[in-house]
Image: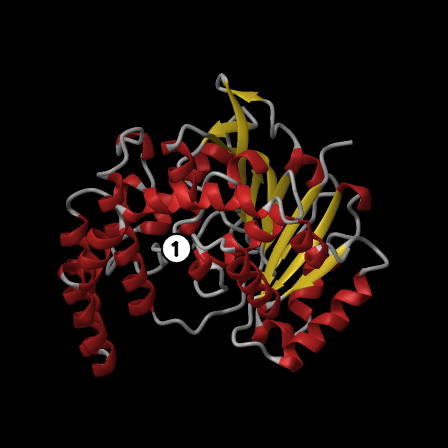
Amino acid sequence: MHEQLTICIPTYGKKIRNHLIISRTLNSLLKQPKDNFRVIIFNTTDPFDEKVSHDLSKLVERFKKHFNIILVNTLDLEYLRNFLIDKGVNGIIPEINFKGFSNFRNSMLIVANILRSKLVLMIDDDEVVEDKKFIEKAAEFIGSKFKKKILLGKTGYYLYDQTGYKLKQQSPKTRKLWLKETSINETLGKLVNSKNRLNDTTMAFGGIMVLHQKLYRKIPFDPNILRGEDTDYLINAKQFGYNFALDNKLRIRHRPEKKLIQYWEKLRQDISRFIYTREKLKYFNKISLKSLEPYPASFLRDDIDYRAVTTSINYATRSLKIKKPDRYMKYFENVKIVFTDAKMHAVINAPKYFSFQKEWAKFMTEISKFTQLRKHFDRF
């Protein structure tokens, strides 16, 4: 039997009230050999909501007869922070929270580490497992040699109902300098269609990522990246000498809810993300831009500022034509942040990852020694 996986699944208030989302994910695990995994549901609703917690607790109880499962929420993180303060273990305590993608993923890894999980599989609550050998495939090759190094991290990929592994490329004319989906599809296509099951990869998916304890205890998600924390994690791991691969037999059905987020906001997040990563690469000596071709390298070159500005202006002009002045102003704010907020955030915070990584490695070693913490979280 493979090493038992700890599956970490985040969810939050609105989705919890609609039980169909998370219960669909849990139901899809029923076909897996129950001795091969255990599940931790992370209720990331913050601040704590008693009704949400009660509803999710009832849902978790339904699945306890099928496999080992527990629920972790903001009260558990509060207990953890207070415990560590009492013990004089400071370090990264301010980052132990569910606010932001990187922080909630790091919090999941902290709990998994307290429970001494050798293998962590992260999936999301809007995904469905279809392969009866999914757990077996997730654990496969981790701890074995790949490209002359021990493989300690890997990712799979998403399948969408309408487009397979591909993302839809919207508005190719307006976004002609920002064809992110096209670049992702090009990169992923080569990996998915490769004759080799394991391949070097320049991108990762947080909703289907497997990490060995020897990796996640050393490498954290970067709390200063606001979007794309999964691919950023891969880049961080490679900088510190760890292998990371894409397994093209490991896939999961992704059925995300329709989001109300406007494109100006998504574009703003991407602008900040790519400017931040570009700045961070200046401090990395083991990762070259060429090694990240074609994606995300195509969004990390010096021309990204020009492309971000041009794309924002294209959308601002379009907003005027369709009589949406509020959107017009939002897109022009995007132009401004290229040279102000995004640039400043990158310059100030990009160098901080190295000190955070050192604190993280020390912290993860320390907390694994506290049996009281393990007793608190070991509620399977």
Q: Amino acid under label 1?
A: Pro
Q: Residue drawn at (63%, 39%), measured in percent from left and top?
A: 119
In the displayed structure, 258 sits above or below 226; it is: below
Task: Give me the residue at 52% from left, 73% from top.
Answer: 46
Q: Is residue 244 left or right of residue 161?
A: left
Residue found 35% across the figure and 72% down from its top: 262
In the orientation shown, which residue stands out farthest toward the top? 148
Around disc 1, counting alpha carbons within 10 Å, would you say few (fewer than 14), some (14 to 19), or many (20 or more)? many
Looking at the picture, tell me which residue is in the foreground, 360 or 172: 360
- Pinpoint residue 112: horizontal percent, then vertical percent: 62, 49
Residue 128 place in picture, x, y as percent: 65, 55
Residue 317 occupies quadrant: bottom left
Residue 86 visible in the current orientation: yes
Q: Number of numbered discs present?
A: 1
With respect to residue 324, does 376 lie above or below? above
From the viewer's perspective, tell me whether residue 358 is left or right of residue 1.
Answer: left
Q: Name the residue nearer the viewer: 242 or 249.
A: 242
The quarter holding residue 332 reads bottom left
In percent of width and height, residue 240 lies at 39, 32
Q: Secondary structure at mark 1?
A: loop
Q: Which residue is mark 1?
A: 223
Q: Is residue 324 above or below residue 137?
A: below
User: Residue at the location (80% across, 53% down)?
Assistant: 67
Q: Is residue 252 shown to the viewer in this render? A: no
**Is the C terminus in the top left, top right, bottom left or bottom right quadrant?**
bottom right
